[in-house]
Image (cartoon, coloured by chain):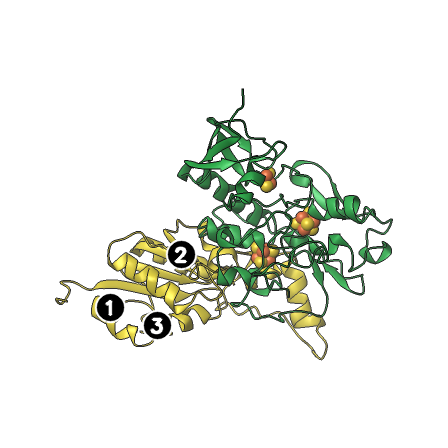
Amino acid sequence: MSQSNTFTLDGKTIPYSEGQTIIQAAMAAGEYIPHLCFNPEFKPHGSCKLCTVKANGRQTASCTQHPAPDMVVESDTKEINDERRTLLQMLFVEGNHFCPSCEKSGNCQLQATAYQLNMMSPHFDQFFPDRPLDASHPDYLLDFNRCILCSLCVRASRDVDGKNVFALSGRGIKSHLIVNAKSGRLADTNFSGDDKAAHVCPVGVILKKRVGFAIPIGSRSFDEQPISATPHPQGACPVGPRSNAATLPPHPTVKDA
Amino acid sequence: MNAPTKKLRVATTSLAGCFGCHMSFLDIDERLLELVQLVEFDRSPLTDIKHCGPCDIGIIEGGLCNAENVHVLREFRANCKILIAIGACAINGGLPAQRNHLSLSAILEEVYHAQHGLVDGFIPNDPELPLPLDKVHPIHEVVKVDYFIPGCPPSADAIWKVLTDLLAGKEPELGHGLIHYD
Ligand code: SF4
Ligand code: SF4
Ligand code: FES
């Protein structure tokens, strides 16, 4: 018996192929499901839970869940979007996100997702954590204040660059990003601007030095169109325009700062 | 349009802010003429009234960096039916909150004693001066806030949209292009 390899996403029929996750099939069909730690070029991490959907009535991370024939998936509902907004608010208050002085503003996936989900305030009390910068490297700066622990840099450095420059350390609220050097400083690793890890951060942590504000605030990618309308073809992430330029189609809409 | 029966009373203030949000508010330009048909101003930098009386809408720019900010905020909350936080500083502390990872004593020491070029500096202690808070806080951490207009500053169009939505009795809504954190 041949089964229909389709499921429905908010009532729309989505085809899928064996091995695809819900979010991969949805993206291939041009549908947007909010996500932060997922990037189609990497193995899913399943940690941010922004991509949560209801599949046949049960909540699950769509970046790790595989669809089943005729599965009923709900994503763009008030209930789920309210929960996603709460997750975003927690991410914002846990770090220090002063967008007006952030080089990533307008190209930031966290910020654009918060716009998409109408996050008008952080709601919770700010943690105001003390997270010193690492400006030791000659070409790159690490601003840990904005890290959302998505592990994309960890995955890129380990799986693509074969370097293991970054790691997540600690547990629960104490989790934080570390640099694998005895000194803990980026300058004391073999990190380079040519690394994949230099170009995957969805927020403003891993920043190239001396290119600040080349494109003015207000004229950046997500100023022009919301993240949900930004084409997200398989293999090219809207926030990773510099990545794998040789093998991936250039992303038409994201401006490289 | 017929003349409105009763004008809504609006108060505005800037706490730990830079007045940029007020400047952006003035950027609604000739729409101000339309607005003053519908509202009248209570306490505001535009009127120089010193205390906030009973109002329909209170608009707060800036966060809380000293004791006076907290008193003014509480006066607004006690008097305004609807309280709006406008701008990054009111909403998440903004620029002034960038001091929060430093101790207040270290900051005062640096600014009034240790800074290069200071001779016989002293930390001002006139009783007229409001005491600085240990940390800068957004206003929703102290009073209930009904609506938020994010941005640094929010655009005149965003401010206009929220005000006109409220005046029309609608839930304010900023869509793409009007919601900004920068
Ligand atoms: S990383 Fe994104 S959300 Fe955080 S300050 Fe920068 S632009 Fe804002
Ligand atoms: S530095 Fe960026 S890519 Fe790395 S874990 Fe933090 S947010 Fe993710
Ligand atoms: S995108 Fe699926 S859990 Fe983060």
Residue B55 visible at all: no
Q: In this rendered view, identify the residue nearer to me: A239 or B71.
A: A239
- Is disc 1 in contact with disc 2, using a CB cutoff of under 8 Å? no
Q: Residues within 10 Å of mark 1 (few under 14, many from 20)?
A: some
Q: Which residue does the numbered mark 3 point to in the structure image? A: B28
Q: Chain of mark 3?
A: B
Mark earlier in primary sequence (1, 2): 1
Residue lying furthest front:
A1
Q: Amino acid at mark 2?
A: Gly
User: Do discs 3 and 1 share a chain?
Assistant: yes
Of the chain colours in the picture, the one used for chain A is green
Image quarter (top left, top right, bottom left or bottom right) of the N terminus of chain B: bottom left
Q: Chain of mark 1?
A: B
Q: Is residue A28 above or below residue B161?
A: above
Q: Is residue B13 left or right of residue A175?
A: left
Of the chain colours in the picture, the one used for chain B is yellow
Mark earlier in primary sequence (2, 3): 3
The percent position of residue B60, horizontal first and vertical second, equals 40, 61
Q: Is residue A50 left or right of residue B62?
A: right
Q: Identify the residue shown where x is 74% and y is 45%.
A: A154
Q: Is residue A203 above or below residue B33?
A: above
Q: Which residue does the numbered mark 2 point to in the structure image? A: B175
Which secondary structure lies at badge 3? loop
The percent position of residue A97, horizontal first and vertical second, equals 58, 55
The percent position of residue A133, horizontal first and vertical second, equals 72, 58
Q: Identify the residue shown where x is 45% and y is 54%.
A: B139
User: Do discs 2 and 3 share a chain?
Assistant: yes
Q: In this rendered view, identify the residue nearer to me: A140 or B133.
A: A140
The percent position of residue B75, horizontal first and vertical second, equals 35, 57
